[in-house]
Image (cartoon, helix red, strand yellow):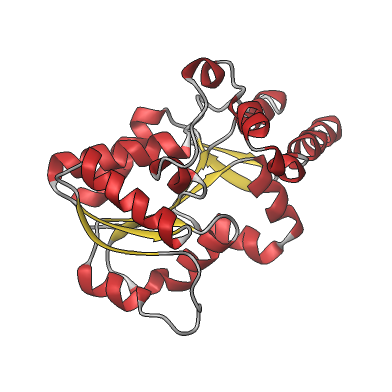
Amino acid sequence: MTDNSVKILGIDFVNKGFHDVVEIHLSSIKNDHKSFIVTANPEIVMYAQEHPDYKKIIQSADMVVPDGYGIILASKILNTPIIERVAGYDLMVRLLEYGNENQLKIYLLGGREETNQKAVANISSQYPNVQIVGSHHGFFDWEKNTITAEIKETKPDIIFVALGFPKQEQWIARNLDQFSKGIFMGVGGSIDVLAGEVQRAPRIWQEMNLEWFYRLITQPSRWRRMLAIPQFLMQIFKLKLHK
């Protein structure tokens, strides 16, 4: 672990502010580098604890950003505070803004077919200079598809993968060697927000670090997934006591 990362339950989280994280990825784009970004919250960390193969994928990423206040809280409890939360949705939006400023190529993978099409339409409307060189819904045969070939041919600068965890990280890790460039980022349910099907928590909820609670209220079907948060914090307190 370096001064620029904080290890939480075996996962190294980048310890930089949002602006610095953005600048790192913009530099990668400018230099045609390839990068794998994981936006990890307590749910992802807990899943990684129970699935070693998935944990290896997370550990292989070029950057793991702390997407979730639970990660920030855990870092404080362990006396290794992370500077700030880097919300995956905010990072995605900033990359889209930069893409619009520089006419970048974007590929969008994931979501239901209708959701994917709505997201593509909204990106085209809000970021008219972005070149959407391809898109595909998230329900496809992993062994028989033309997605990888299409991405190789169109050479997008940014590839947003919205398959939900663990599939989005698994797909990226499985296919990353096929590509020579591009920012590959798992964006999960952000595609639903892009499509206008789900509303993000109001700013005041975000500032109070209660975005997770807003999502639970508006999407009560997520309650089982939210159980990972208290389980995660229990693991953190056990680690604290052990130390």
Q: Position of residue 69 (x, y in %)?
A: 60, 28
Q: Position of residue 196 (x, y in %)?
A: 41, 40
In the depicted structure, whether residue 24 falls above or below residue 51: above
Q: Position of residue 145 (x, y in %)?
A: 41, 80
Is 4 displayed left or right of 41 in the figure? left
Query: Where is residue 52, by image quadrant?
Result: bottom right
Residue plotted at (28% across, 68% down)? 180
In the depicted structure, whether residue 158 falls above or below residue 8: below
The residue positioned farthest toward the bottom in the image shown: 144
Query: Where is residue 94, by image quadrant?
Result: top left
Give the quadrant of the N terminus.
Answer: top right
Residue plotted at (52% across, 60% down)? 169
Q: Position of residue 130 (x, y in %)?
A: 19, 48
Residue 126 at least partly seen: yes
Residue 1 at least partly seen: no
Residue plotted at (81% across, 31% down)? 237
Residue plotted at (56% across, 19% down)? 205
Is 112 displayed left or right of 29 in the figure? right
Give the quadrant of the C terminus.
Answer: top right
